[in-house]
Amino acid sequence: MLEVRSLSIHFHRYARGLRRTVLTPVVDLDLKVSAGEVVAVVGSSGSGKSLLAHAVLGILPSNAHIEGEIWYKGQLLTPERQAAMRGRRIALIPQSVSFLDPLMRVGAQVLRAAQLSGKNRHSAAAQRAIFQRYQLPLEVERWYPFQLSGGMARRTLVSMAVVGEAELILADEPTPGLHPEVVQETLNHLRQLADEQRGVVLITHDIQAALQVADQIAVFYAGTTVEIAPVTAFSGKGEGLLHPYTQALWRSLPQNEFIPLPGMQPSPQDLPQGCLFAPRCPLATAECTAERPTMRAIAQNQVRCIHAQG
Amino acid sequence: MNILRYLIKKLLRLILLLFTISVLSFTLVSLSPIDPVQAYVGAEMMRIGPEQRQRIAERWGLNDPPVVRYMRWLSSLMRGDLGTSAIYNQPVSQVIRQRFFTSLGLMGTAWVLSGVLGFLLGVLSGARAGSWVDQIIRFYAYLLASTPAFWLALLLLIVFAVFLKWAPVCCATPPGVLPEQVTFAQRLHHLVLPALTLSIIGIANITLHTRQKLITILNSDYILFARAQGENLFGLIWHHGLRNIALPAITLQFASISELFGGSVLAEQVFAYPGLGQATVQAGLRSDVPLLLGIVLFSTLFVFTGNALADILYHLIDPRIRLGVES
Amino acid sequence: MNLEVSRSSTLWSRVGLARQRVFDRRRQTLFLIVFCVLCLGVILTGSARAAVANQTNLSERNQAPSWAHPFGTDWLGRDMLLRTWSGLSLSLQVGFLAALFSSLIGLLIGLTAATLGGAVDAFFSWWIDVFLSLPHMVVLILLAFVSGGGLNGVVISVALTHWPSLARVIRAEVYQVRSADYVQLSAKLGRSSFWVARHHILPHIWPQFLVGLILLFPHAILHEAGITFIGIGLSPHQPAIGIILAESMRHLSTGYWWLAVLPGAALLVMVKLFDILGENGRALLDPRTAQE
């Protein structure tokens, strides 16, 4: 359904005159999503994962430069196609209530989303229906975003993405600091959407949440996906995991060995040559720093490591 | 209930403010080296002897201590008596009322015009930030922000009244016509240039502010989400932008009433427009103390009302304040 | 090989960037200096030429701008360029005095309110509010009237009306500095409040004060010109720019446009220059905005 091939995003920031800096928060990223599955993109907070969703939708800021290709249902996405698909075929579930217009009634915002999704004539009915589906009381229509409780805000945001007939849902960090019950509810909603034959991308820093609902987990490190593995590979001592970073991440979880990985992710302003993980990698050799490794398929996994073996 | 308490608070504040200003301005005027008797009598001072002068001073109570004089002034103020204007030979309250209504048309027109135009220019400039349209609008606004109002008035006068003869050179009505015979069109014709002056000057502030606010909003999370829903630039501004910049712009426009009043003093001077601004100048030039004090108090009230209206409007419109008082 | 090239190029571009930044700063400073010299030149020579500027030449009355008289001549044959020049210099001096007094008042009140706090702060804050809620022009007229007009009247009235915004800025700044950890620490270490003010607060206030002073200039000059134009300020014997413009009013209907247009444009240019100076000075002196 969605295929991202070696996507890189650069930001050129001009200060005064000709002074400029280049940031590369996304480097050579690959990702594949099929209908009916939840693919979780897991990485540490503030590492630029959201930009992936923005790039797919074509809503990056104007100083961003994109390399690579994004394919949707066999079509290469161009800015024009992205504009036609935003809200209609591809929808975003944002992080928090701050993504709602603070001065617009909730019902009107859901209605607007329905109109934009192409349901011109039936948008009011669609809005009512979606409120019912997500158990939003009718009076919430007349509320303003600041009046919503955490759970209601979450359901409103989901309902805005689903009020149209979007086939691909990009959920950007949909469970930040929420009550466990609300997190569970939101994850269930995402699972339901995938079971209705939609494709769902769950972008999150919370690997536990990802493990609960995802079919595939893509591990995001320093702007790229180092490994994409089926959720079943995340078990035991991590024998099914092939990339040294994924393994280290798995070991660092509290329910496992709880051993943190020393060092820090490289800054997007100053990326290492060659493999992005090499500076912290126990297996690193001279070859690793020579060239960026490409994605290789080994067994059921996709790995970006020259040392990985099945 | 809440709004009532708020209004009472505002009212108390206004009373305290007016009291402070009355004390301040009265003190200043009594410290002034200008002799009120001389100012009143003017050129005929030569023909008045010291005894006569003493008698006037006594009748006005000028020999009493300042506190007594202030209390006397304040108590008549409470009764709505602001004294008598020497230069217009009318009660001050009447002068202010007449003149204010003349100025109100001028200031009101300029206020609405500069507000609407400034807002539109600001939206245009902010929506296309960085484009040549934006550059031109910003240049214009920055230039106007430091343009002296009276010079702009002179420029307009030279171009439209002297050379093109499209507009009259002075006054609020044609000379030699009785007030009751002046038509609405004639009034409007005389209003155009002064109102234009004040509008052009007033645009700068609101334009720059609206532009900045719109740019901030276009970079917000909710605009990002709206774009993700497929909203285009026009839709973003129409559905989300205007809603969010309108209130701050209205507030700013109300707060600019003080500047507008200052501008009207200068514009009325250039166009000899018989409004409150011109009366202020005359009162200052010809030492009409009761009128000057009256105008100081009145203009304070006027500016305060403008700011208070903006504040109240905020409370009535913004749902976050209106509904979310508890949080 | 390829690697080497890219690395050295980033190094070079970095050197270039650093040079660019230094150059930017230097260019700004240069601009400041040139501008100040220019202004001083206008002030000094303009005043010196007041006598020449008032020379009448009845054979050259009411001439439109030409090479000999770029700003034209007035009804007494006086050269308008010279008159504008000396007028600007007078306005500048008056504006400088007024802005200086005003900013000193602002500094004093801001400092006092914030350092003493409590009732004193409430008292001064109230006065700041009172002054901000009065229309400038009306207060200017009242003050100029009370102080008897003339040069003193203008300076006093402009000085007494422009301090509140700066006082507010300074007050906020002092509060911010005082709540900083290192200041709290020195107070605990037994430093006197005078010592703290001298070593911690003043260095922080100084740039704010300087920038505030420069940014007060345009306002001071514009308001000075405004009340002078009205006729409450200076007398016709002190031909500041406002007087020149006021006098020109009587001759406008005859079509002598240059009497008003060019002197006013010169005033606008001067005010704009001060605006630019203030904004640049802010960028240079205030490390926070300089980062932008």
Image (tube, coloured by chain):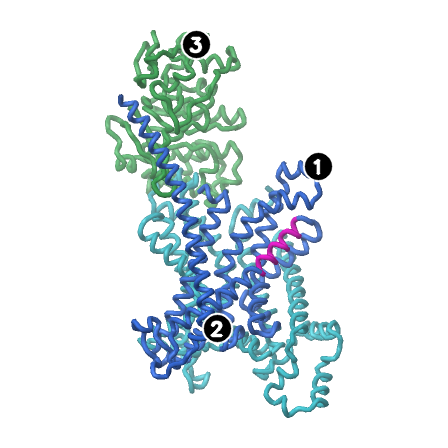
Chain colours: A green, B cyan, C blue
Residue at image position (58%, 59%) is C163
Please say whether residue C239 is visible from this viewpoint.
yes
Q: Nearer the viewer, residue C140 or C211?
A: C211
Residue topped by disc 2:
C229
Confirm or deny contact between disc 2 and disc 3 (CB under 8 A): no
Chain letter for mark 3, please: A
Outermost residue on the left side: it is: A75
What numbered label is drawn on residue A235? none
Residue C56, given in percent of the width and then of the height, sits at: 40, 80
Q: Is residue A152 above or below residue B3?
A: above
Element assignment for label 2: helix
- Residue B178 sits in which quadrant? bottom left
Amino acid type, label 2: Phe
Residue topped by disc 3:
A238
Residue at image position (41%, 52%) is C31
Query: Quick check: C86 left or right of A11?
Result: right
Query: Quick check: A83 left or right of C192?
Result: left
Confirm or deny contact between disc 2 and disc 1 (CB under 8 A): no
Q: Residues within 10 Å of mark 3 (few under 14, many from 20)?
A: some
Q: Nearer the viewer, mark 2 or mark 3?
A: 2
Marks 2 and 1, the one that precedes in the sequence: 1
Q: Nearer the viewer, residue B253 or C168?
A: C168
The part of the chain drawn in magenta is C101-114
- Residue C161 sits in which quadrant? bottom right
Residue topped by disc 1:
C188
Amino acid type, label 3: Gly
Q: Nearer the viewer, mark 1 or mark 3?
A: 1
Magenta stretch, main secondary structure, is helix
Chain letter for mark 2, please: C
Q: Are marks 2 and 1 on the same chain?
A: yes
Chain letter for mark 1, please: C
